[in-house]
Image (cartoon, helix red, strand yellow):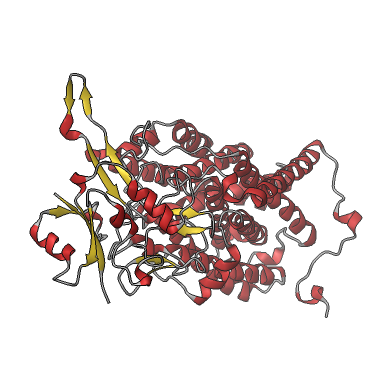
Amino acid sequence: MARYGMALDYKSCINCKACESACKEENGILLGADKHRIWVGVNDIAGIFPDLSIGSSSFEPSQCQQCDNAPCQEVCPTSATYYDDNGVVRVNPDQCILCTYCMQACPYDARYIDDRTLTVDKCNFCSDTRLANGETTTACQATCPTKVRIFGDLDDPTSEISQVLRDREHYSLKEHLGTKPKLFYLT
Amino acid sequence: MQLSKYLPYNKHTLKSFFSFERTPLNMFMVGLSFALVGMLGFGIIEYLLQGHHAYGVTRQHAWGLLIAMYVFFVVSSTGLCIISSMGHVSNIKAFQIIGRRAIAGAIIMILSGFVVLVFEIGHPVRMVIYNVLTPGFTSAIWWMGTLYGLYLVFIILEFFFLNNENHKYSKIFGLSGLIVGLAAHSNLGAVFGFLVARPIANGVFFPLYFILSAMVTGSYLIFLIYGWRYKMKFPPEVEHMLHTLAKVLGLLLAVLIFFEVWRSLTAVYGGMPERADIAIHMIMGANFLVGEMLLGILIPFTIIIISKGKAIKTMVYASVTGMVGIFFMRYDLVHDTQLAPMLNLKIREYSVAPSLVEYIPTSTEWMISIGALGVSFIMYYTADKFFNLDHKESDIH
């Protein structure tokens, strides 16, 4: 079994939001500002003209961090949130009672309510729609025009993600919380 | 099988059930109760039509007024249970007379809490099934829910044996209810305290504070219930009980002030992001200053201090402001926990980066939350009609 993770070469992001669209299309995510599994965060240019700080402007594509120690899984009262065999944090909609405790516990705002099933939904690395069919990429990765995303098996030393994480400096979000995220931002 | 053989109750016809003294205050309470239940009904219809879209909750503020009101009710229930246990479990003589009425109140309050919760949890039936089939033992909600279920069973049995004047078993189930209730209630605090992502809530404070504020709430409710029962003309043993309770309440409020002061100072000190900024926002707000502090603590505390606990009639009125304050405490607890956005970057064009998360309860939330008070009033009226909640000689032992 694999242990999937994703590296993001976020400085290459051009905020085209193709990943957001591909995710919605691939996974049938409903329209609406709050209904998204992934997103691109924007750091606006700081300062007042003409003293603008161009360097402060950046884009930060993000999604569920697929934590190895996921707070959302820990707090779920009915074990609806679970780790699958590939280490992906997933939700079983049949067991979710919509108490939304996981939405409180997630430090990344990665969860939302899916109005189709009336349960909490989140990114699952396209486990249902792509990985289950034998594909090895996620929709957001496949569509990215600037190749920001590198998806693969962290336990396989020959995978592209393992190599890039060996070669390049990277950080994860809110690491101090002990969540052990499997999303890595390449610097 | 005759139920009255096992559980003594007063038999009523429909006419005798609805008969009561037509005083202006009673008529007002009848009108208020039906208005509140009507509001609840209207709110439920709105919820059934629109689901959670009828509420003002969002992705960033997933818990709203209904959760606050649920906490309000279960805090009240646990508080009544703790205060009543001082009598028939701890054998403090002054409080032995309140057992039956307080435990009836505790049952009513937790049932009212469940009424609110049913309309907040998306799948309450599924919750009962999977709580058993696939329990999440690391979840504070699982422990809280399971223990509260057990607590309800114990306090119902306690009430049953109190009503049968079986003081041996009422004491056993009273002690069981107290222990399980304390565990359940501190777990409710831990529901917030375990949130590592939210520094303003994370830590040991809430599990302890919940027990303390439950005792304060229970005391206010005892004042209100007895003020209503005797219409301010208290018999000597009740007067003695309320005098003693006022002194206990004074001490509890002093400790609560101490808790609040140190919680605020430790939260602000050092300027830690997502804690200090939220704490400053919180303690500078009217909800905290007027609602929690003035109404909830300072007015009753001042009356107790000035009168040395003797102004029990004034304390009945002060308990109304106290309960309003307690409501603010519950609302602030839920709201302030979610104030800091978990995602600090803007993700939509033509917007700004999120600062504090906004939340305004909708009319549906208000109708269900406040309307549930009507359910409490009607359940209390029914309990008072069917059972002899007044103390007897044999209660004091």
The picture quadrant where one finds residue B350 is top left
The picture places residue B128, in percent across and down from the top left corner, at 57, 69
Question: Can you see residue A22?
Answer: yes
Q: Residue at x 77, y 38 (%)?
A: B28
Residue at far top of view: A50
Residue in the image at 25% along x and 70% along y: A3
If the image is split into quadrants, where does the C terminus of chain B sit?
Answer: bottom right
Judging depth in this view, the residue of B149 and A96 nearest the camera is: A96
Residue at the spot x=13%, y=60% of the render? A164
Point out residue A179 in the picture as x, y percentages from the top left corner: 27, 60
Residue B326 to residue B126: above or below: above
Among the 4 quarters of the image, the one containing residue B123: bottom right
Q: Give the answer, above or below, for where B161 lies relative to A61.
A: below
For this orientation, the residue located farthest to the bottom is: B1
Q: Is residue A55 left or right of residue B229?
A: left
- Is B343 or B40 nearer to us in this picture? B343
Q: Quadrant of residue A177?
A: bottom left
Q: Position of residue B185 (x, y in %)?
A: 48, 60
Residue B271 locus on image (x, y percent):
24, 38
Asked whether the viewer can see residue B268, the reply is no
Taking the image as shown, residue A45 lies to the left or right of residue A26, namely left
Q: Viewer-proximal residue, B181 or B300?
A: B181
Left or right, residue B232 beside residue A164: right
